[in-house]
Image (tube, coloured by chain):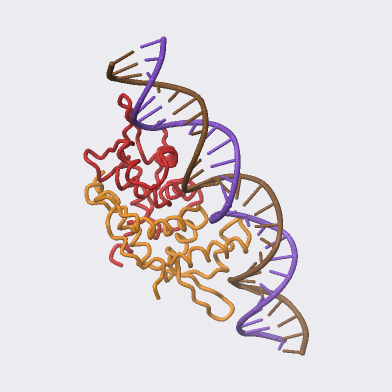
Chain colours: A red, B orange, C brown, D purple
Amino acid sequence: MSDPADVPCCTPLTAAAMSAEQADQVAPLLKALADPVRLRLVSLIAAAEGGEACVCELNGAFDQTQATISHHLKVLHTAGLLERDKRGVWVYYAVRPEALSAVATLFTAPALAGA
Amino acid sequence: MSDPADVPCCTPLTAAAMSAEQADQVAPLLKALADPVRLRLVSLIAAAEGGEACVCELNGAFDQTQATISHHLKVLHTAGLLERDKRGVWVYYAVRPEALSAVATLFTAPALAGA
DNA sequence: ATCAGATATCGACGGGTGTCGATGTCTGAG
DNA sequence: CTCAGACATCGACACCCGTCGATATCTGAT
């Protein structure tokens, strides 16, 4: 319990001045997503059948080493963006919708939506 | 022209697998936002009167040095998230709505919106 | 011309990050 | 028990990042 991604975080960026505490809570989430490989990892997992993907499938989709992909998955998992499920020899990762929607709330600004 | 923020970027993260090129284009935007101070800077500017703020006001809102704030503003400007407008001795920064909405599109997933 | 104030830039420091090869750990099969 | 495969961890490397103090640059006022 108490995942890093379980933050209130629910004030859109442009609605009102953000508190320092809020910024400190949300920034790690964005930091975890601010990498091309990790962005594609989340995208691949979210778009996969059942919203989850086996590491063995993910490894083949990138030029980087298996160690590097494993590292990125750990970063995303530590940030609370991915869930880990080990089934036998394989490990499946799934996105945590609450985490993504927390970030989404940030950018879904009322006055900005039509821009 | 051709700001870093002027990217198509318009496939939600969870809709389909993201291309490597798309990821390479969007990641810098998230990287620029993935810092507590810069997050608050954007928020302060966006929530300010007229959607813009003078650096002199911003400096007072943080514990960091004027040099540090200036550096963060430069990062946000280089990423295409802020516009710069010098009026006499003062410099005003304003958010570029297109840039923020580009990021918003990423997280505004159709299937995820209700989560 | 001089000066004070507002921003930007510079150089440096400590710490974090992405990547790799090598190795460790776990699991199911034989 | 032993082995092969899947995944994680480790140690190392080059590089980037946030922060600061000091300094430069610009601008309006005197």
Residue C3: x and y, percent?
A: 76, 80
- Residue at 57% across / 63% down in the picture? B71
Q: Looking at the image, is A28 positioned above or below residue B21?
A: above
Q: Quadrant of the N terminus of chain B?
A: bottom left
- Residue at 32% across / 45% down in the picture? A61
Q: Nearer the viewer, residue C17 or C30?
A: C30
Q: Quadrant of the C terminus of chain B?
A: top left
Q: Looking at the image, is A70 positioned above or below residue B41?
A: above
- Residue at 54% across / 64% down in the picture? B58
Can residue A31 be spotted in the picture? yes
Residue D1: x and y, percent?
A: 41, 10
Decide if residue B56 is on the left or right side of residue B46. Answer: right
Q: Nearer the viewer, residue B10 or B69?
A: B10
Q: Quadrant of residue A84?
A: top left
Can residue A6 be spotted in the picture? no
- Residue at 52% across / 55% down in the picture? B37
Decide if residue C18 is on the left or right side of residue A114. Answer: right
Residue A64: x and y, percent?
A: 41, 45
Q: So how many labels did they put on this image?
A: 0
Residue A46: x and y, percent?
A: 28, 44
Q: Quadrant of residue B81?
A: bottom left
Q: Nearer the viewer, residue B54 or B72?
A: B72
